[in-house]
């Protein structure tokens, strides 16, 4: 049995007969590191080992998509003539950044197939970037239509469907809100969407990933079909895609199939696990400029904002590494689905189906199992392994939420992490990981507990 990461094939330690100690140490280090000095090879749980063996065809398919995405990213870097002076950073107003901001925006826009992009550490989160995009598109009297059911928890207060009045939500500014519920199979309700757009619908909002809903994440093909239906009803209705967790999972992006704006977080997929903060908005040039004015101020747009040099370099380097990190996260999700479904747990996505984001959900059924799962993940993390996750209220979330994220970047879900709301059906949402074997090690411990 072999794996095809890189340009050569390497025997998998847990899939071949045992050899001498010297041979094992020499050949297995990449996949089976010792648990301590002088210890024997790491032993995955037998069920995890069998699942990993059975997924090699799926892993190879992930690597093929990874190679195509990496090629697109590298080509964009070359066309923008990225050079060391772009990593110099800036202070104050950010006028003296050596062209780094402009180059990063150009690279990102080309990668996602957009006319323009703004990629900045000043975006606090994906929610912040999405909010800037929505306020750029909507005006008093407009309606925001969510076409994939309820949005992620943190957007509820941005829209004004939860939380206090007069804090600057879309509702406070006279923007109405409506949802198209999902179909019975958890996908988009195409029949309802075909007649959903009204004259006042200023923006149709598509959330690509599942969020905390038990539903299918949307493929780029689904998004293309939805955009076509929306534009057929009203060509002037803008389409905004929450692209969080979806970047580089497929070989195309929503802006390539007609999305007017897309937005997301740099401590998710496009940050490659090393971007320390930030977010992005990409799409039509005039709309990106309008979103930039929400981030900064009208008249300032994309021309202001200092970025320290070490941050600027990390944004470039993280973007370059992103396809590789996303590929490993997808493999981890495939492994989670395979192992947990075999143990009788409901999973979403189902085992071995094509992936459209890096999130793997597992329905655990009760509060105790959800907390126990998160505790095991935290214990296997490199940072804060001694910390016990505790469920509690978190700004932006409607329910108690528990997080396991012993990550180098605070809140980074491109690194190995999981979380879930303490509400029925008590599902845990797993994502990230710099190599699929991280999840193999986690699952080995999870199976001892639940």
Image (cartoon, rainbow, N blue to C red):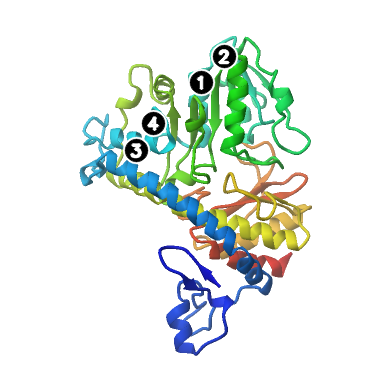
Which residue is the site of mark 2?
Answer: 173
Quadrant where the image shows the C terminus: bottom right
215 sits left or right of 315 in the view = right
Dots 2, 3 in contact, CB < 8 A? no
**Depth order, front residue of 349/16:** 16
Q: Mark 1–mark 4 contact, CB under 8 Å?
A: no
- The reply to whether callout 4 and callout 2 are in contact (CB within 8 Å) is no
Q: Which residue is outermost to the bottom?
A: 20
Q: Position of residue 12 (x, y in %)?
A: 53, 74
Circle nearer the viewer, 1 or 2: 1
> What residue did someone put label 3 on?
107
Tell me the residue that label 1 is attached to.
Answer: 135
Asked if residue 93 lies left or right of residue 154, the reply is left
Residue 377, above or below 216: below
Rounded to the nearest whole Å, what is the CA distance between mark 1 and mark 4?
15 Å
Q: Position of residue 310 (x, y in %)?
A: 30, 47
Q: Residues within 10 Å of mark 3 (few under 14, many from 20)?
A: many
> Quick one: label 3 or label 1, which is nearer the N terminus?
3
- How far is the residue under mark 2 from the one under mark 3? 34 Å
Secondary structure at badge 1 equals helix
Q: Residues within 10 Å of mark 1 (few under 14, many from 20)?
A: some
* Quadrant location, the N terminus: bottom right
What's the distance in space between the residues labelled 1 and 2, CA to CA? 10 Å
Q: Which labelled disc corresponds to residue 118? A: 4
**CA distance separating discs 4 and 2:** 25 Å
The mark nearer the N terminus, 2 or 3, is 3
Q: Residue at x 27, y 29 (%)?
A: 93
Tell me which label, 1 or 2, sits earlier in the chain.
Answer: 1
Marks 1,2: beta carbons within 8 A: yes
Q: Nearer the viewer, mark 4 or mark 2?
A: 4
Identify the element where label 3 is drawn: helix
């Amino acid at each position: 049995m072999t794996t095809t990461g890189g340009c050569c094939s390497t025997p998998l330690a847990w899939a071949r007969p045992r050899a001498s100690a010297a041979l094992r140490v020499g050949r297995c280090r990449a996949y089976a590191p010792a648990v301590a000095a002088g210890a024997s090879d790491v032993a995955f749980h037998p069920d995890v080992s069998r699942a990993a063996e059975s997924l090699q065809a799926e892993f190879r398919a992930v690597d093929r998509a990874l190679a195509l995405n990496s090629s697109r990213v590298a080509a964009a870097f070359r066309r923008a003539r990225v050079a060391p002076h772009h990593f110099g950073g800036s202070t104050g107003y950010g006028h003296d950044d050596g062209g780094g901001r402009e180059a990063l925006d150009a690279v990102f826009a080309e990668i996602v197939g957009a006319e323009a992009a703004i990629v900045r550490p000043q975006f606090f989160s994906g929610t912040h970037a999405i909010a800037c995009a929505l306020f750029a598109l909507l005006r008093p009297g407009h309606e925001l239509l969510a076409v994939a059911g309820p949005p992620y928890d943190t957007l509820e207060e941005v829209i004004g469907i939860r939380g206090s009045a007069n804090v600057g939500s879309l509702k406070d500014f006279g923007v109405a809100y409506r949802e198209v519920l999902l179909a019975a199979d958890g996908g988009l309700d195409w029949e309802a969407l075909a007649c959903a757009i009204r004259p006042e619908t200023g923006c149709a909002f598509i959330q690509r990933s599942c969020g905390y809903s038990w539903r299918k994440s949307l493929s780029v093909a689904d998004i293309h079909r939805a955009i076509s239906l929306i534009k057929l009803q009203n060509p002037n209705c803008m389409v905004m895609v929450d692209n969080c967790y979806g970047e580089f999972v497929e070989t195309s992006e929503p802006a390539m199939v007609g999305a007017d704006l897309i937005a997301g977080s740099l401590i998710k997929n496009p940050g490659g696990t090393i971007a320390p903060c930030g977010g992005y908005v990409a799409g039509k040039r005039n709309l990106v400029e309008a979103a930039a004015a929400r981030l900064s101020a009208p008249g300032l747009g994309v021309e202001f904002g200092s970025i320290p040099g070490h941050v600027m370099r990390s944004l470039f380097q993280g973007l370059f590494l992103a396809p590789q990190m996303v590929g490993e996260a997808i493999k981890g999700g495939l492994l989670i689905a395979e192992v947990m479904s075999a143990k009788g747990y409901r999973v979403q996505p189902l085992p071995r189906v094509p992936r459209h984001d890096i999130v793997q959900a597992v329905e655990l059924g009760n509060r105790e199992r959800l907390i126990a799962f998160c505790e095991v993940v935290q214990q296997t993390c490199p940072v804060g392994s001694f910390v016990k996750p505790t469920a509690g209220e978190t700004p932006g979330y409607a329910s108690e939420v528990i997080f396991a994220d012993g990550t180098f970047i605070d809140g980074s879900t491109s690194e190995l992490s999981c979380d879930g709301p303490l509400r029925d059906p008590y599902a845990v949402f797993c994502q990230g990981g710099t190599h699929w074997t991280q999840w193999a090690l986690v699952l080995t411990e999870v199976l001892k507990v639940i």
